[in-house]
Image (cartoon, rainbow, N blue to C red):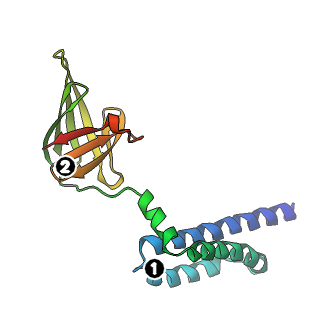
């Protein structure tokens, strides 16, 4: 029983060490100017949590995590650019106004006030549908009724995409 508990504790500690190493690596890539100030503060915080019986066993677990970090760093700047590209770019938050456009023959009117708005579809047969809209600029998401969409702001235009970013589903609304 003690061996299982020790093994489980060791596995948890190894996972935690790997998580910390990856987290530090992500911080280095995202915030290279702030990283030197953060790293010393994080290392002492880890030391008191370690128990003397686990320190020798932890050393091999930390070394592979550090080696993986160093291996990833050995690739140069190519590896550093990839994580930043996969993250959404925060959109401007001051997009208040009325935007209009077309979607499959329907006339779309989007009225934005702050982080909310109204999406109105005027169909070619005269039917009108009105949906509430909520914007999440940090994640480039807008929720139209129950549909989650991706949006980008380009000057006086808002481009609305499905999650798959299929160009045929793109809606361009102009202010």
**Image location (x, y in percent) of residue 48:** 63, 80
Q: Residues within 10 Å of mark 2 (few under 14, many from 20)?
A: few
Q: Nearer the viewer, residue 100 or 142?
A: 100
The reply to whether discs 2 and 1 touch (Cβ–Cβ < 8 Å) is: no
Judged by depth in the image, the label closer to the viewer, 2 or 1, is 1
The residue drawn where x is 35% and y is 32% is: 146
Q: Secondary structure at mark 1?
A: helix
Provide the residue designation for mark 1. Answer: 35
With respect to residue 93, does 66 lie above or below?
below
Mark sitting earlier along the chain (2/1) = 1
**Image location (x, y in percent) of residue 33:** 39, 80
**Image location (x, y in percent) of residue 161:** 33, 40
The residue drawn where x is 26% and y is 26% is: 104
Q: Residues within 10 Å of mark 1 (few under 14, many from 20)?
A: some
Q: CA distance from mark 2 to mark 1?
A: 34 Å
Q: Nearer the viewer, residue 56 or 48?
A: 56
The residue drawn where x is 22% and y is 55% is: 93
With respect to residue 7, does 66 lie above or below?
below
- The label on residue 174 is none
**Image location (x, y in percent) of residue 24:** 53, 73
- Residue 112 in which image quadrant: top left
Q: Secondary structure at mark 2?
A: loop
- Residue 174 in which image quadrant: top left
* Quadrant placement of the C terminus: top left
Name of the residue lying farthest toward the top: 125
Side of 30 relative to 18 (left or right): left
Provide the residue designation for mark 2. Answer: 114
The residue drawn where x is 44% and y is 84% is: 37
Q: Nearer the viewer, residue 53 or 145?
A: 145
Side of 120 relative to 85 (left or right): left
* Quadrant placement of the N terminus: bottom right
Q: Nearer the viewer, residue 137 or 126?
A: 126
């Amino acid at each position: 029983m003690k061996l299982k508990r020790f093994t489980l504790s060791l596995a948890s500690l190894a996972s935690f060490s790997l998580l910390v190493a990856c987290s530090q690596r992500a911080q280095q890539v995202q915030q290279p100017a702030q990283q030197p100030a953060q790293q010393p503060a994080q290392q002492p915080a880890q030391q008191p949590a370690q128990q003397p019986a686990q320190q020798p066993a932890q050393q091999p677990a930390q070394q592979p995590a550090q080696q993986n970090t160093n291996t990833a760093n050995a690739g140069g700047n190519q590896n550093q650019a990839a994580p930043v590209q996969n993250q959404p770019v925060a959109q401007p938050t001051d997009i208040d106004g009325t935007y209009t456009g077309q979607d499959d023959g329907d006339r779309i009117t989007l009225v934005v006030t702050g982080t909310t708005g109204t999406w109105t579809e005027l169909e070619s047969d005269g039917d009108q549908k009105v949906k509430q809209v909520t914007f999440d600029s940090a994640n480039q998401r807008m929720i139209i009724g129950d549909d989650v969409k991706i949006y980008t702001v380009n000057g006086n235009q808002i481009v609305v995409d499905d999650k798959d970013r299929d160009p045929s589903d793109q809606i361009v609304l102009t202010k």
